[in-house]
Amino acid sequence: MLHTNLDINEKGHLTLAGRDTVELAEKYGTPLYLIDEKRVREKMRTYVDAMKKYFGRGSVPLLASKALCFKKIYQIANEEGMCTDIVSPGELYTASCAGFPMEKAYFHGNNKTDEDIALAIKLKIGCFIADNREELDSISRISKEEGVVSRVILRVTPGIDPHTHAAISTGKVDSKFGTAIETGQAIELVKYILTLPNINLTGIHCHVGSLCFDSKPFIDAADIMVAFMAKIREETGVTLTDLNLGGGYGVRYIETNPHIDIADNIRQVAEHVSAVCEKEKFPYPRVLLEPGRSIVADAGVTLYSVGSVKTITGYKSYISIDGGMTDNPRYALYGSDYTVLNASDANAEPDMIATIAGRCCESGDLIQENVKIKKPERGDKIAVLVTGAYNYSMASNYNRIPRPPVVMISPDGDDYIAVRRETYEDLINLDA
Ligand SMILES: *Cc1c(COP(=O)(O)O)cnc(C)c1O
């Protein structure tokens, strides 16, 4: 199958981490997010161990919260030795309520309000990843009022397109995030930060994009970033220690996507950082990465129940399911690829080509088109694979559809609820 945690049992049902997904769908109802906890932990360990081994010097992965965010994920991340990056006060609050140590949390985002900054300081955030001048003024001012010194990493744009792998493509300098190195604005901002009270600038950050299937974008970014750190040292006398290269190894959503050996890729990036540090005569930094998708995506499967199969004579066929863009908006948003199968009859040869349609009042509410699938009957379970990332975290209540629960399969094979299903009462709870 697509990933080693997926299989088909003697009943012809899809299994995840050895558990019958159709049975779990019957037990908890559909739509249902399933997450294989063992797989999440394995991926976290791969990052933690490889970064320690190849980057050394306190280097550590930050779990990108936006990929999958609820209390249990932070507890697992903490147990596995991860730090975390959070982008909003809601993620910050969730991490804090989960007991995640705040000194290991990094606060991202391109528009942190004064309230966000004050909350983060109150919760003793470990580091701000600052985006812009106004925000830095605010971090400085609030830190001063609170009598603390805030650690800051500055987000810059190195101008790399992860898809063409072209360095210095000005297109990527044009971003709502960070400050461009190429235009000279980043060095000016660094000089400004060094004048601000109650701020300890320790490093620079960049995020070249997501879904990188090899290390070329990280290697290109490391070149530009280390050269920029050397330039900062030359022009200001300050030697920064933290090099944050952002998130983004890809995952296998479909058979034609490659497998990625994460540890080996980290080794390649580490070797390159060594080489460029030597060339620039710059001390080897502490390296941070922010994986999200590559940690949680292949741990997840979503189960739906089929309502109808509709074939429009001379056109195409639709399979209607009891979820859709409210629990997985990624096809509607970016036409993302997914592997879809009939989990109730997973061994059978596909005998139709269908569009998988959701239940919203919206013709764009599709999960995937042109899926080769064994024709389901009403009540059969449809599985969408590799949905651990950016599904639950992007879910909405459009059409007042309650969000599905997240059920985890523990490393010893027990199922448990990590997030309960929303009720109709939850939906009206905020209404006056
Ligand atoms: C989205 C994002 C990540 C995580 O990307 P993945 O593709 O999920 O690994 C990390 N850092 C930043 C700044 C991001 O915007």
Image (spheres, rainbow, N blue to C red):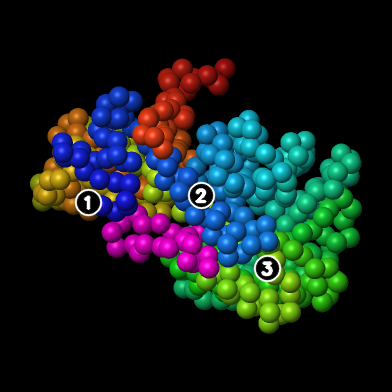
Tell me if I can see residue 176 in this picture: no
Mark 1 neighbour density, 10 Å: few (under 14) some (14–19) many (20 or more): many
Q: Which residue does the image show at 64% across and 58% down from the upper left?
A: 59
Q: Which residue is mark 2?
A: 44
First in sequence: mark 2 vs mark 3: 2
**Mark 3 or mark 1, earlier in chain:** 3
- The segment highlighted magenta reads 248-267
In this rendering, the label closer to the viewer, 2 or 3: 2
State whether residue 310 is above or below residue 270. Answer: above
Disc 3/disc 1 C-alpha distance (Å): 42 Å
Which residue position holds label 3? 180
Alpha carbon distance from label 2 to label 3? 31 Å
**Residue at mark 1 to residue at mark 2: CA–CA distance:** 32 Å
Instruction: Give the residue at mark 1.
Output: 371
Give yes or no for residue 384 being in the magenta stretch: no
Query: Could you say where residue 339 lies in the image, as x and y percent from the top left?
Result: 28, 51
